[in-house]
Image (tube, rainbow, N blue to C red):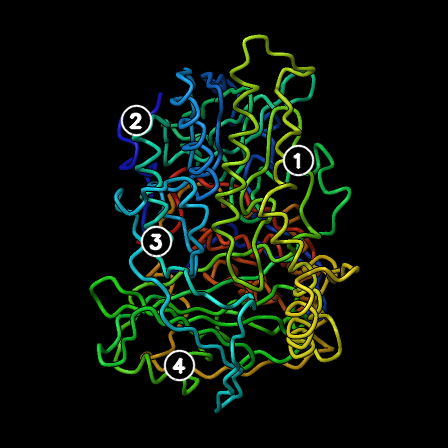
Amino acid sequence: MFPASRYACKAHRSIRALTTLQTDSAAPQLYTSIHRRTCSSVSTPRITTHYTIQPRDKDPRWEGIEMERFADEADVVIVGGGPAGLSAAIRLKQLANEQEKELRVCLVEKAPQIGAHTLSGACLEPSTLIELFPDWKERGAPLNTPVTEDVFSIFTKKHRIPVPILPGLPMQNHGNYIVRLGNLVRWLGEQAEEIGVEIYPGYAAAEVLFHEDGSVKGIATNDVGIAKDGSPKDVFERGMELHAKVTLFGEGCHGHLAKQLYKQFNLRENCEPQTYAIGLKELWMIDEKKWRPGRAEHSVGWPLDRNTYGGSFLYHLNEGEPLVALGLVVGLDYSNPYLSPFKEFQRWKHHPFVASTLEGGQRIAYGARALNEGGFQCIPKLTFPGGLLIGCSPGFMNVPKIKGTHTAMKSGMLAAEAIFPKITAENLDSETAGIHVPEYSESLKNSSVWKELHAVRNIRPSFHNYFGLYGGMVYTGIFYWMLRGKEPWTLKHGGMDANQLKPAKDCKPIEYPKPDGKISFDLLSSVALSGTNHEGDQPPHLTLKDDSVPVARNLAIYDGPEQRFCPAGVYEYVPVETGDGMRLQINAQNCVHCKTCDIKDPSQNINWVVPEGGGGPAYNGM
């Protein structure tokens, strides 16, 4: 059924992909230029071959192929091996062991190893970890760097304005730890397996399964052995089904199954649209003389203008080597289609205050991921018959703190404590085949997570004013510091990030400096450091609802912003071979699974789905 080895599960026929990928079709597309070229309308070549867009039942190549799936039963199935999913799994088994109950908990994770897709800053608030494992130090949890110094700055192009961090402000990190979150997640996986959780890395949850009454039945893992043109290979294998009384969805930011559940159960009916950011990160080995273990630096301002939300971090780790983790977070509600978060990050490193730390050092890792930034106003309904949403998937990040790990873990633990008595009850009484656990929502609303997110609910949306960033800082300094979120109003966000881009004709192109190869770097050499691998001969998992939209609308109106907001060089507009237009090329092998394209596409035409299990980045403790 599953391989015996939990953590060394190999990806299905994955290969290294660092260079651009050629598309199968050379036919011309519809092309409308914004650069004074003539408009030509010709047939659009097929870009999307994935079965979610091109149904197999209408494809003669699939006739006679065995499509039956093997099914297995568990008490609880958890999708996603991140902090939330693992915390939920561990807490369930803790409760089962305490009460001497038999409980089968299965966790599936799309990465080939637990922690391989995990990326965060990260400065960890340890409260939830202490609650889950009071003896975490004795167990060897990889928390090696307590914060010893906080530095906060406003950057101008050449200078730094220091900002004092007053007690009680969100950016104060006294008592927190600088961690490499991938290492912590790997450690949590070891604790989970030790306590009896069944962990299956390398298997991506591709589909939500439903009972006849509409309640969630479980999930199906992805099929493997499908050629890039959408046809079955000789080695085609159907995924398998995992059924459960309750399924927990902890996919992380903008999970593709969660998107389906939002629609199926109308979970976002009473909340605002989620708003996001993209975080880009590098690890550097620096000159030991510049190393300050325990120092946490944050900045706002340059290179972003006042109307672009974002900020930076630079953390000095204490792991026996002079390592620093650094990154830039850019709100995805920006309006200029010429903005490139990756190039802004590379430019930021040249600020004198940052460059002085990096000069003479060596970059050793790179990665990117999207972050939920909506907070309290954007939390959807969390429960539905047969399932729950936990962690970053519904969005429990405290944006002013730049922290979400402790709240994600807490949500997983609360979910476990809410469902345990129901699934172990001898006289189970449920109106639906999949058990509904509304008690989870009530527990969360009475928890520290709800209180924390409610207190900071107005800080992120306070950015939406004429003064932008600086208006938001004034709001934080006056209202939050004095009232701690007790103000009797709740501000709104600006709507979906995809709707915020202005037409290219109304915006000024941004001229970015060329990378120097010492402090700043090009995109493809950066992707190489992410260790990204995908099976090359599979349908691109960056699917398009309509293959003609990218050229006809995104390129024509917004000058192809997917070329710039993607941090991995997945999207390129290239000339058609006949020379009379452009076509979109999708280099799916480069994808680092950040989900930015699905979020920011102004046409909402891109739908990110899971590739074959085991594909994606291979972050080594990012």
Find numbered disc 4 in the image and state the secondary structure of the residue it sits on: helix
Q: Would you say residue 493 is visible in this rendering?
A: yes
Where, by quadrant of the figure, is residue 55 drawn?
Answer: top right
**Mark 4 and mark 3: span between their CA atoms?**
24 Å
x and y percent of residue 360 in the render? 25, 81
Q: Which residue was labeled with disc 1?
A: 442
Q: Nearer the viewer, mark 4 or mark 3?
A: 4
Q: Earlier in the sequence, mark 2 or mark 4?
A: 2
| Mark number displayed over residue 354 | 4
Write the residue at 49% across / 77% down: 152
Q: Earlier in the sequence, mark 1 or mark 2?
A: 2
Q: Earlier in the sequence, mark 2 or mark 3?
A: 2
| Mark number displayed over residue 178 | none
Write the residue at 50% across / 54% down: 594
| Mark number displayed over residue 619 | 3
Find numbered disc 2 in the image and state the secondary structure of the residue it sits on: loop
**127 to 7, vertically: above or below:** below
x and y percent of residue 354 in the render? 39, 81
**9 to 574, vertically: above or below:** above
343 or 504, which lies in front? 343
The three-letter code of the residue at mark 2 reads: Pro
The three-letter code of the residue at mark 1 reads: Glu
